[in-house]
Image: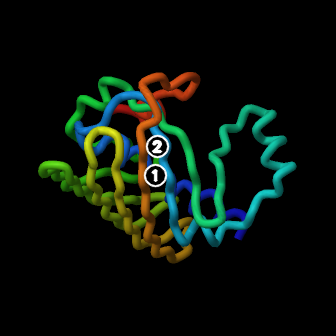
Amino acid sequence: MRNAAFPVLLLSLLAVPFAAQAAGQMKSGLWEMTIKSDAIRKMPKIPPEQLEQMRRLGVDIPHMTSDGVVTKVCISPAMAARDEPPVMSESNSGCKTRNYTHDGDSYTLDLICSGMLNGEGKAQGRFSGGEHFSSTYDFNGTVQGRPVTQHQETSGRWLGSDCGDVKPADQLMRKK
């Protein structure tokens, strides 16, 4: 199971940039994202001393809770102004976005994956003002050949205009 843990976490974190860039209704700045999913709940827990050692080595580890992950994401002014999903190349994740729609304060998109992650997903979300959002993400397929069905809930809240040392989320994804 240890080898499968990383792809499952990757699958969970994959939806964060979609929520972060899905519609031009977010304020730029620092956001706190809370991701809850069954996959994260089932992952083996990393001992606190190992987490601290990884952080000392410069590995950015999000805060893990009993049922999810809490992380900070920076939304650049350019990202906040967009009304389109993030552009993903298959070399980043093996996944591509399709069928993006944005209507008022809501959005939906499909995710098609081929590679380490293989299958289809659907994300949908709703923005409340420019400072809050919630979304769901469902994926059916395989991770490294193992069947996986995942439901995930993500929420975000704006913390402020200064991102500090958190890099903008669009730098995490390769542009076409």
Q: How far is mark 1 from mark 2, CA to CA? A: 10 Å
| Labelled disc at residue 92 | 2
Image point (49%, 42%), residue name:
32
Is disc 2 placed on a helix, strand or loop?
Answer: helix
Image point (81%, 43%), residue name:
52
In the rendered image, residue 103, in percent from the top left (x then y), is placed at 12, 51
- Mark 1 Cα-neighbour bin, 10 Å: few <14, some 14–19, many ≥20: some
Can you identify the residue that label 1 sits on?
14
Earlier residue among tags 1 and 2 = 1
Image point (41%, 28%), residue name:
29
Residue at the extreme left:
103
Q: Give the camera-side residue of 145 and 167.
A: 167
- Mark 2 Cα-neighbour bin, 10 Å: few <14, some 14–19, many ≥20: few
In the rendered image, residue 30, in percent from the top left (x then y), is placed at 46, 32
In the rendered image, residue 43, in percent from the top left (x then y), is placed at 66, 67
Of badges 1 and 2, the one in the foreground is 1
Residue at the extreme right:
49
Quadrant of the drawing holding the C terminus = top left
Horizontally, residue 74 falls left or right of residue 122, namely right
Q: Is residue 99 above or below residue 30?
A: below
Is disc 1 placed on a helix, strand or loop?
Answer: helix
Horizontally, residue 119 falls left or right of residue 56, namely left
Q: Give the camera-side residue of 33 and 87.
A: 33
What is the three-letter code of the residue carrying label 1? Leu
Q: Is residue 99 above or below residue 86?
A: below
Q: Is residue 14 above or below residue 75?
A: below
Q: Give the camera-side residue of 39 and 148.
A: 39
Quadrant of the drawing holding the N terminus = bottom right
What is the three-letter code of the residue carrying label 2? Asn
Image point (36%, 28%), residue name:
28
In the rendered image, residue 136, in percent from the top left (x then y), is placed at 36, 63
